[in-house]
């Protein structure tokens, strides 16, 4: 048996809206055998634009039953029947949410007449209920009222049943089919064509703009998981509603997918990605020559388009490292901005500064020690490659860290040696680094030392 349903509501999201009208027609595959229809008091004002659309006013529902008064009857009509609606996930999410609040668990197989119409009646310019009814010459009366739209959906479903030569309905009802969970505008074929390998996937809106970037060990499985469940929140419903297409990029490993996702989020800034959009409080050592010719080291916040000689997260970490360099290479605390007062240089007092701050040491001699300190700092930073599986059997993947900085990654034919760093770079794509990527690679290196090729 089929339960063909239409509802009217106060808004577009189940968790933030209420039902104002319900119509349910029980159909045995040949004819209507039972029906139920009622206005519902939502116990909240109906927005003016919805009143204008549906014709349902606050006065009309004032004496109507509340949903909890009809919940049992609605549940008994729906349970054990196949739930059918035009854009089924909208109606189902509202009824499931409100029945759940009344203590009833709705768990039905579902059919969407929008998706079925696209398969059984391909080529129409629009699959909205009104336009489909015009194309198929179905009589639609009382548009945007639950009974009128539900009766039109009944006639549409009867047409679909009689024209379903290729078993589209049986396929949609298959328990293993994920199509009923997919966003309304997302072609099922795009999901079916997704590979079961690591990579990055992109959700696009109606205009093709990327609205979400995700990474996966198995692209197809991860994408499908986005659409299962019945989260009725406004954010979730809006997210699903805005997905019109999917694209993807394969990667050789899950680690590369993590890295590429981070890069793409910062490049595309998708509206539904939030986790990696925070501004990073990251610092660096910057080296410059002052007007007197002395090289100076300064701690500054990292800014876009600037390249520090060394990066770090915590300001305290930077000050500690700089003090170590000052002591070890006999640098001047004042020229390194560790002492900003006009008092006598503490380095001179402690005999670790040779008087550059007082012009007693020539710039050329002092600068050699600054350069040696920077070289020492960089020499401490790891340089390594991570060589692993490629996207195909004929290639291998490679991630390059050079002196503590992420250089890039790419794919190398298996017959090309990876021992020569400069030659290897011809095969790699350089990418901008960020703190997420650096931490990811540091953690990986710490727990997978056997897989690293030190340089």
Image: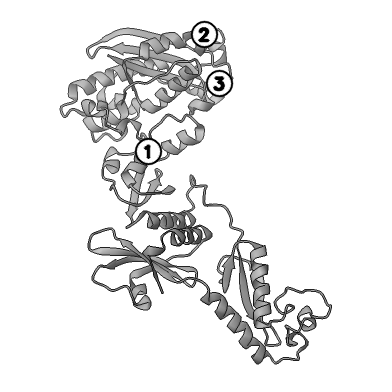
CA–CA distance in space, label 1 to label 3: 34 Å
Identify the disc placed on residue 46: 3
The answer to whether 162 appears left or right of 396 in the picture is left
Q: Disc 2 on helix, strand or loop?
A: loop
* Whether residue 354 is situated above or below residue 248 in the rendered picture: below
Residue 376 appears at what percent x and percent y?
56, 79
3 and 2 marks in contact (CB < 8 Å) = no
Task: Determine crowd level at label 2: few under 14, some 14-19, many 20+ residues with C-alpha closer than 10 A.
Answer: some
**Residue at figure coordinates x 27%, y 21% from the top left:** 156
Callout 1 touching callout 3 (CB < 8 Å)? no
The residue indicated by pointer 1 is 225
User: Which one is in front in this view, the residue at disc 1 or the one at disc 3?
Assistant: 1
Q: Secondary structure at mark 3?
A: loop
User: Is residue 378 or residue 7 the one in the foreground?
Assistant: 378
Q: Earlier in the sequence, mark 2 or mark 1?
A: 2
- Residue at image mark 2: 65
Q: Position of residue 322 (x, y in %)?
A: 66, 73
């Amino acid at each position: 048996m089929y339960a063909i349903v239409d509802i009217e509501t106060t808004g577009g999201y189940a968790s933030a809206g209420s039902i104002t009208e319900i119509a349910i027609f029980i159909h045995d595959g040949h004819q209507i055998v039972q029906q139920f229809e009622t206005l519902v008091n939502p116990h909240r004002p109906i927005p003016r634009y919805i009143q204008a659309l549906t014709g349902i006013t606050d006065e009309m529902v004032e004496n109507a039953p509340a949903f909890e008064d009809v919940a049992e009857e609605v549940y008994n009509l729906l349970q054990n029947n196949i739930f059918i609606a035009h854009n089924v996930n909208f109606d189902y999410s509202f009824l499931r949410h409100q029945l759940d609040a009344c203590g009833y668990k709705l768990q039905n197989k579902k059919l969407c007449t929008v998706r079925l119409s696209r398969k059984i009646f391909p080529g129409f310019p629009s699959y909205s209920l009104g336009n489909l009814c015009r194309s198929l010459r179905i009589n639609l009366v009382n548009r945007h009222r639950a009974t009128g739209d539900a009766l039109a959906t009944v006639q549409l479903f009867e047409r679909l049943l009689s024209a379903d030569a290729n078993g589209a309905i049986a396929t949609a009802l298959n328990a293993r089919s994920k199509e009923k969970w997919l966003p309304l505008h997302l072609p099922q074929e795009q999901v079916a064509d997704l590979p079961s390998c690591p990579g990055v996937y992109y959700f696009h809106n109606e205009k093709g703009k990327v609205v979400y970037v995700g990474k996966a060990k198995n692209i197809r499985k991860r994408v499908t998981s986005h659409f299962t469940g019945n989260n009725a929140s406004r954010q979730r419903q809006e997210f699903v509603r805005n997905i019109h297409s999917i694209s993807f990029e394969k990667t050789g490993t899950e680690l590369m997918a993590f890295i590429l996702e981070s890069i793409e989020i910062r490049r595309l800034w998708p509206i539904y990605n939030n986790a990696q959009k925070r501004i990073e409080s990251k610092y660096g050592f910057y080296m410059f020559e002052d007007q007197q010719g002395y090289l100076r080291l300064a701690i500054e916040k990292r800014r876009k388009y600037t390249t520090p000689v060394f990066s770090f997260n915590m300001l305290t970490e930077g000050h500690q490292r700089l003090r170590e360099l000052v002591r070890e290479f006999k640098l001047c605390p004042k020229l390194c901005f560790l002492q900003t007062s006009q008092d006598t240089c503490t380095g001179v007092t402690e005999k670790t500064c040779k008087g550059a701050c007082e012009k007693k040491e020539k710039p050329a001699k002092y600068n050699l020690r600054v350069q040696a300190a920077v070289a020492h700092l960089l020499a401490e930073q790891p340089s390594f490659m991570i060589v692993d599986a490629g996207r195909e059997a004929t290639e291998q993947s490679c991630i390059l860290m050079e002196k503590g900085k992420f250089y890039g990654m790419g794919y190398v034919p298996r017959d090309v040696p990876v021992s020569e760093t400069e030659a290897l770079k011809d095969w790699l794509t350089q990418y901008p680094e960020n703190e997420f990527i650096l931490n990811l690679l540091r953690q990986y290196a710490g727990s997978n030392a056997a897989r690293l090729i030190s340089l």
